[in-house]
Each structure stands twice: as structure tokens, then as C-alpha cells.
């Protein structure tokens, strides 16, 4: 106990050096924590939002764009697809379930999605108030939408044309909120859901000149995307090929595209891990130099400790305890800073109506952060501690007489 207290006092006796070592260690550990938290949450978000979706069908274009727009609602869809062709796909023997999605409008930056009740059911969404829509121009708000807008069941709102805020407001045809979804930490939290007929009615009534125009538009109705669930795993081989070659549409496999996306994201995380490793290496060198100099500067103090009966192991342990103090403090600061950075990133992403990230999460891999800090600090202290251990009492006494 005296060794621990004395090592703490020695650490405080050089605040600038201790502060620099602490900063370097904490920055490296914060970067590691940030990578662990963000990567774990992104992987979970992708896995959660992709659950049960075997293919996404949409207009021809980029398969990655199709997945990001149809599953995660993070991109603009490549276009619309004819309703008749989608209905033909729904009757295909390989398709167990087809969920249509119609995009084009938004509310305060949150996307309004025309769909069926199968969409919230797919994510096992629950209602905190109200009910699902039962007719066109009724809407259900995701938890994040309700929180940001303050709307509740029974309220009315008008959508904006386009997927971002600032488009023309459809004031003539407002929606009525029929319900609010409970938070699910999935893509539904940041969506406004309504019947597909709402999207058709809104644009047909706004563009049709007369009843004849309205009937013609009804014959040419389109949707934006369709989420497909296969009836059997064998459909994964033949269905995308059929859609891509025999129809005017495109089928993209989410698992394949997300693997590519995570590989690209992995490059960024590898760079950040490398940066953290450089910081930790720099911190270990700094701790080593500080403790090595401490052995030289404290020779008189070490001599006094030996005269008072301290063993060589106790003297060496004093330096190791200093390193452990640095590791403990750096672990606390690094973990806190890593969670804070993740929370800040999550705040900015939510402001952009993007992925949900939270700082209030602990992942199992974080237990290695303090272990890594201890390993770096103790390794840096080993050589100075060994040097203090090997010095003879006579040399220490001579050093005390001739400092």
C-alpha cells in the first residue's frame, strides 16, 4: 500500500510529463474504443435491417445504390418500376413475400414510405399509441420522427416533395397520424409509413387534369422498390438472374453488396486502428523515457528507501506502479473519450437522418482496452524497473553523497 501511495505522489510530482504520457495513452485508447463501438453498431444495424430480406428489386442502375436506398434509406433510388411487373414477381413461385416501397416525399427530412402492413410486421414493430393506417392519407410515425416533430396520433402534417427537406409542400393533401411506432433501433425509427395508395393518390390528384388523366395514370402506376423474401434457398441462384435478364428491372443481393460495403468501410477502420497503434507506440516510448529519467533523477530517493529497508523488488515495483497508475487513468479517460466521440458521431448522423449510433453501449471487445493499456505501460516500465532493481546499495549511497 505504501508503494502504491508513493508511486502516486511521484507521478504527481512531475505533472507535465505525466500529463503528456497520459494524453498520448488516452488518445490511442480512445481511437481504439471509437473503432470498436462504431464498427460493432454498424455491423449490428446492417444485420438487423437486412434480416429476412433476400433481394431488393428496383430500376436498373447500381446494385449498391439499390440496397442503400431500399433497405437503409441512405441513398436516392435509381428510379421507379412498373407496378404490373412487380405484381407478376409477387406471383412467382420462388417468392414467399414481396413488400412494395414507394418513395418520393419527405417530412422534415424524414422519408415518407408508401408500403403495406407487411413492412412494419417484417421488423416486428410495435405501436406505442394509435394504430396502423387503414386508408390512404393516414400515416404511422417512426419513434425518431415522432420525437423530432412532436406529432402524436390524430395530428395532421403535409409532406414535402422530394427525399430531402425544402421541396414543395403538399398542403392541399395533408396526412393524418394514425399511430406512433415504439423505438426498434432499426430503419423504421426514422421513417413515416403510409399506404402505397397514399403516394399514388397524392401525385395523381396533383397532376391529373381530369378523370381521364386520372384513369390513365392508374393504369401506369409505379412503385420505387420491392423487398423480396425467397420461398427456398435455391431461388437465390435463379431469381436474380431471371429479373436482371428477362425484365426491365434489377435484382440486387443485400448480403453480397453489404459485404462489399463493409470491406470499403473496413479500410477506414484499419487506418484508424493504425493511427491508434502509432499513438500507443509513441505513448510507450514516452513512458519508457520518463521512467528511465526518473531512475536517474531519483537515485538519492532510492538510496533513502533502500536504507530504510526497502528491497530491490520494492524499488522496482515503485516504477511499475507508476506505469500502472498511468494505464488505469488512461483507460478511464480513453474509454470515456471513445464513447463521447461515438455519441457525437451518432448525434450528427441523426441530424442527417442516417444510421443510429449511441454512446450508451458497451461491447465485449472493450474489455481489452484496459488490458492493452496495462500491457503497454508495464512493458515500457520493465527496463527502467530492472535498472533500478540491479543498482547496488553502495552505488545508491554514493549517488546520495555525490548527487
Image (tube, helix red, strand yellow):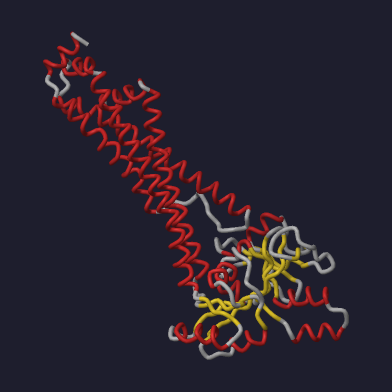
Q: Is residue 2 left or right of residue 17?
A: left
Q: Position of residue 366 (x, y in %)?
A: 38, 49
Q: Is residue 47 above or below residue 233?
A: above
Q: How many marks?
A: 0
Q: Position of residue 270 (x, y in %)?
A: 40, 53
Q: Which residue shows up at 13% across the image and 26% down it?
A: 390
Task: Tell me the quadrant of the picture where the N terminus can be found.
Answer: top left
> In front: 150, or 92?
92
Q: Is residue 60 above or below residue 34?
A: below
> In front: 252, or 19?
252
Q: Position of residue 82 (x, y in %)?
A: 67, 83
Q: Quadrant of residue 223?
A: bottom right
Q: Residue furthest top?
A: 401
> In front: 258, or 107?
258
Q: Quadrant of residue 277?
A: top left
Q: Is residue 48 left or right of residue 380?
A: right
Q: Residue furthest right?
A: 210
Q: Quadrant of residue 115?
A: bottom right
Q: Is residue 194 above or below residue 337?
A: below
Q: Which residue shows up at 41% across the image and 51% down it?
A: 271
Q: Position of residue 264 (x, y in %)?
A: 46, 61
Amino acid at each position: 500500500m505504501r508503494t502504491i501511495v508513493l508511486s502516486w505522489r511521484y507521478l504527481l510530482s512531475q505533472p507535465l510529463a505525466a500529463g503528456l504520457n497520459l494524453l498520448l495513452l488516452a488518445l490511442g485508447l480512445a481511437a481504439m474504443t471509437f473503432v470498436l463501438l462504431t464498427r460493432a453498431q454498424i455491423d449490428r444495424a446492417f444485420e438487423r435491417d437486412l434480416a429476412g430480406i433476400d433481394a431488393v428489386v428496383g430500376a436498373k442502375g447500381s446494385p449498391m445504390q439499390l440496397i442503400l436506398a431500399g433497405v437503409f434509406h441512405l441513398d436516392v433510388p435509381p428510379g421507379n418500376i412498373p407496378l404490373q411487373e412487380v405484381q407478376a414477381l409477387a406471383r412467382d413461385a420462388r417468392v414467399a413475400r414481396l413488400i412494395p416501397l414507394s418513395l418520393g416525399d419527405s417530412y422534415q427530412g424524414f422519408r415518407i414510405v408508401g408500403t403495406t402492413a407487411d413492412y412494419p410486421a417484417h421488423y416486428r414493430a410495435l405501436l406505442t399509441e394509435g394504430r396502423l393506417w387503414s386508408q390512404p392519407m393516414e400515416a404511422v410515425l417512426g419513434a425518431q420522427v415522432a420525437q423530432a416533430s412532436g406529432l402524436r396520433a390524430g395530428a395532421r402534417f403535409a409532406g414535402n416533395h422530394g427525399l430531402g427537406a425544402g421541396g414543395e409542400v403538399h398542403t392541399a393533401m395533408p396526412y393524418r397520424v394514425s399511430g406512433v411506432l415504439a423505438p426498434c433501433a432499426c430503419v423504421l425509427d426514422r421513417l413515416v409509413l403510409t399506404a402505397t395508395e397514399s403516394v399514388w393518390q397524392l401525385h395523381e390528384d396533383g397532376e391529373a387534369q381530369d378523370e381521364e388523366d386520372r384513369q390513365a395514370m392508374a393504369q401506369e402506376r409505379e412503385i420505387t422498390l420491392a423487398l423480396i423474401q425467397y420461398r427456398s434457398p435455391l431461388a437465390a441462384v435463379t431469381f436474380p438472374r431471371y429479373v436482371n435478364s428477362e425484365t426491365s428491372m434489377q435484382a440486387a443481393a443485400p448480403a453480397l453488396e453489404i459485404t462489399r460495403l463493409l470491406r470499403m468501410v473496413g479500410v477506414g477502420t484499419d487506418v484508424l486502428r493504425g493511427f491508434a497503434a502509432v499513438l500507443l507506440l509513441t505513448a510507450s516510448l514516452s513512458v519508457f523515457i520518463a521512467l528511465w529519467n526518473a531512475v536517474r533523477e531519483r537515485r538519492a530517493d532510492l538510496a533513502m528507501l533502500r536504507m530504510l529497508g526497502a528491497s530491490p523488488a520494492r524499488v522496482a515495483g515503485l516504477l511499475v506502479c507508476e506505469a500502472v497508475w498511468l494505464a488505469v487513468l488512461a483507460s478511464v479517460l480513453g474509454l470515456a473519450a471513445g464513447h463521447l466521440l461515438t455519441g457525437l458521431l451518432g448525434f450528427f448522423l441523426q441530424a442527417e437522418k442516417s444510421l443510429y449510433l449511441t454512446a450508451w453501449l458497451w461491447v465485449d471487445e472493450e474489455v481489452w482496452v484496459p488490458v492493452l493499456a496495462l500491457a503497454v505501460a508495464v512493458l515500457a516500465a520493465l527496463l527502467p524497473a530492472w535498472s533500478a532493481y540491479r543498482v547496488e546499495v553502495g552505488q545508491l549511497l554514493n549517488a546520495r553523497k555525490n548527487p
